[in-house]
Amino acid sequence: MTVTATSVDESDQLEPKAAPGSRLTRLVRLVPAAVAALSGVLLYVSFPPRTLWWLALPAFACFGWVLRGRSWKAGLGLGYLFGLGFLLPLLVWTGVEVGPGPWIALVVVEAIFVALVGAAITAVSKLPAWPLWAAALWIAGEAVRARAPFHGFPWGKIAFGQADGVFLPLAAVGGTPVLGFAVVLCGFGLCEIVRLALESRQTRVVRRSAATVALLSVAVPVVGALAARGLVSDKAEDGTTTVAVIQGNVPRAGLEFNAQRRAVLDYHVKETLRLAAKVKAGKVAKPDVVLWPENSSDVDPFADAQAYTDIDEAAKAIGAPISVGGVVERDGKLYNEQILWDPVKGPTDTYDKRQIQPFGEYLPMRSLLGAINKNWTTMVRQDFSRGTKPGVFTMNGAKIGLVTCYEAAFDWAVRSEVTDGAQLISVPSNNATFDRSEMTYQQLAMSRVRAVEHSRTVTVPVTSGVSAIIMPDGKITQKTGMFVADSLVQKVPLRSSETPATKLGILPEMVLVLIAAGGLGWAVAAGVRGRRAGDV
């Protein structure tokens, strides 16, 4: 059977017809734009805190429907609308405390990447097996977005919406790129199945090769996910350790809490002492490891004697090493730091956050932004410096890999801790700035995906919630509420084996980028040949 490219006119045959110049005609022309935007909203609804992961499939099916066979200019616009529909509601939390300006600016920039992917998909949509090329292009877009601008912003990766989905085991095969690729491929495959079914009803011709490719686009991701379940295991390989996750809470939500650094530290000391009393009374098992959140001590304990004494008292009371999230100034530089605090020796090791947050922990283009609005520079008075080494603390024999908050969104930051020997991953975070928004649930879902990706227990100590303990299969076994003081104690497995995703690292993503480039190159070359043939 021959496979022919679908032209713009063929795609338009599926849309309602109306008399030229009529009001209905003008409305019909808006249908693709409306579908693109609403498909983006549908994709957003598939993300946490909702568990409607499967909505990502019809979202991409509809997106593929409006893109297929159109010009690259149309794809650019439709892609941008899809990006806005998805990212505007997904990232609304970025404006909780600073107003809508930064939120809208972030979305306007990030949606450009989606627009470029939309334009590229229109080109490959004319090729045989177009769902394959289109899905690879989406992952290529995510790869770029995770690296630029300002060291990237991977928030909204398709994989992060799949913590409750059937495709999750694929994270252990090739990380977030393979998991996301499977979901997008399945969505575009559904689009092609429906399109071919409608076409066959009109023409009564079944193009078997195209139908086979469409069916495989859906079947292969599902079968692959089922087969990958064997890679997911909760079995302890290096024994167990009893972890305690401390959530001290904050005096009140919002940016103002940073001015109350002493109170935040006091809250975490108090909650640790409360846990120590429960242990002494035999109500709770004695922890081997105690994990505090990011910013649990914004008072520098190396410069403030009282802060040092308070943390030391908590470590001695609980009788276990504590990983303390502090803000530390050293040699005139500011660091977001995790401090290993031994109950006998005091502070013995540190980990400095490597992937710091632009506009939150440092201000890009400071002089330019200051010239535009001086208030912007006062929000980040001093830039944080970046750490340079992975952070793996040895705590009572267990090797704990530290991934501080924002770093959990970056593949390399998590993998580096595992390849450096981490048997358990901790994601200390501070979400108090974002109030009760969906941000904390989106970040929690990332940690669930990371647990499966690297087959490690993941703990998430957060200042104000939601703190959690996650098993290597991605299931949450304990979690706290928001804006409450609480602690979680549990015996968890320690693991040292590496999943294929851990071993392969960036390779699966690079393969998908090459596939995307190959498909796009093929489409461009075919278009050039077609134009030359038309000129003859």
Image (cartoon, grey):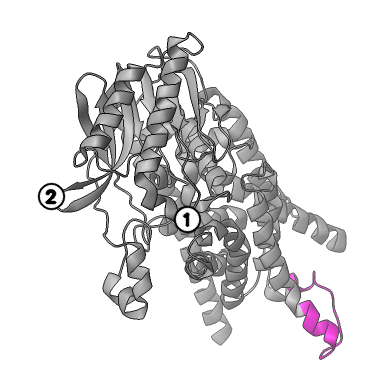
Q: Which mark is residue 36?
A: none
Is 283 contained in the magenta span?
no
Residue 71 horizontal side relative to residue 428, left or right: right
Which quarter of the rendered picture does the C terminus lie within? bottom right
**Can you identify the residue that label 1 sits on?**
142
Q: Residue at 42% across / 31% down in the picture?
A: 500
| Tag 2 residue | 331
The image quadrant that residue 1 belongs to is bottom right
Q: Nearer the viewer, residue 182 or 128?
A: 182
Residue at 68% over, 60% down: 39
Question: In the picture, residue 394 is in which quadrant?
Answer: top left
Q: Nearer the viewer, residue 364 or 26?
A: 364
Give the extent of the magenta segment: 11-28
State the image coordinates of residue 401 (x, y, percent, origin top left).
34, 31
- Residue 464 seen anywhere in this rendered image of the structure: yes
12 relative position to 519: left or right: right
Is residue 138 depicted above or below 469 in this figure?
A: below
Circle 1 Cα neighbour tier, 10 Å, few/some/many (<14 / 14–19 / ≥20): many
* Type of amino acid under label 1: Glu
- Residue 125: horizontal and vertical position, in percent? 61, 64
**Extreme residue in the top direction:** 282
Instruction: Using the image, determine if residue 1 lies above or below residue 371.
Output: above
Give me the residue at 57% from left, 52% from top: 132
Cα separation between marks 1 and 2: 37 Å
- Quick one: label 1 or label 2, which is nearer the N terminus? 1
